[in-house]
Image (spheres, rainbow, N blue to C red):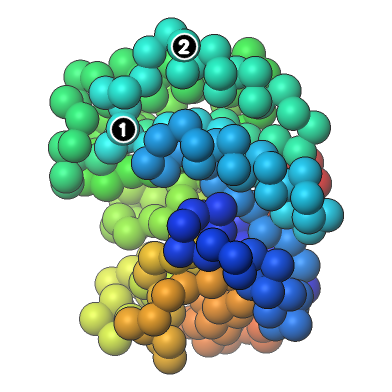
Amino acid sequence: MLIDSHAHIQGKEYAGEVEAVIARAREAGVEKIIAVGGAGDMSSNTEAVGLAKCFPGVYATVGMHPHDAKDVGAEELQEIKSLAAEPKVIAVGETGLDYYYDHSPREVQRRVFGQFIQLARETDLPVVVHERDAAQDVADLLRTEGAGKLRGVIHCFTGNYEAARAYLDLGFYISFTGIITFKNAEALRDVVRNVPLERMLVETDSPYLTPVPHRGKRNEPAYVRYVGETIASVKALSLDEVARLTTENVRKLFGI
């Protein structure tokens, strides 16, 4: 059985279909789904927590995407801190830095990311990190603000092995999406070859990044199987072995 460690099934893309989406995931061998909050606005957090309360195999995270860091003030931080106390909230995030789009000023992104790192330490929760074109600053903040007392995952990893190695050295897990199934992603598959399976998670980032052979359609947690199959192929392992270890990694990191 696999675990989709990062999905946004609380989004409007699944309105009226969540139960069917979860059922299809189970039929595909996906036993648990982590509904990740923080994409768009605060409602994504409350909705993720709501789903986790309603469905036994769903867990939630709460935070704010770096795109929306400019909208995070004291009130939002307090609300997220309150949600983090919910029993099925298993991490802070997603949070991090995105220098590709720069939808929020970089100094604001860094400040808010630091605040979420502090929240993760206060609550003793792992952190789910979004990073794009900001590997050095993310690693530096995890090192300085985390002070060696932080655990977490770099989700949707797309960087090179040097960046992956820096995160691994900090004790973080690396998570891969359907991007590794794309024809032009050989460089990323090389990273997969070098990252130990014991430090790896699989995810869909639904509704985005749909893997081959469904590319171009809406993604959903059932398709995390294709990510697992690609890792198995790249590492010359069985899918069962990839599923066993990545599931064990999720349980270790998030305590589920």
Where is residue 78? Give x, y as percent: 54, 13
Residue labelled with disc 2 = 75
Q: Residue at x 56, y 53 (%)?
A: 10
Residue 39 picture quarter: top left
Foreground label between 2 and 1: 2
Q: Element under label 2? A: helix
Amino acid carrying label 1: it is Asp
Q: CA distance from mark 2 to mark 1?
A: 14 Å
Q: Determine if residue 241 is in view.
A: no
Mark 1, other Cα within 10 Å: few <14 / some 14–19 / many ≥20: many
Q: Quadrant of the N terminus?
A: bottom right
In-image side of 134 versus 169 (left or right) = left
Q: Residue at x 28, y 37 (%)?
A: 67
In-image side of 143 versus 111 (left or right) = right
Amino acid carrying label 2: it is Glu
Where is residue 104? Give x, y as percent: 20, 30
* Circles 2 and 1 in contact, beta carbons < 8 Å: no
Where is residue 72? Give x, y as percent: 37, 20
Where is residue 129? Give x, y as percent: 45, 40
**Which numbered disc flags the more N-terminal residue, 2 or 1?**
1
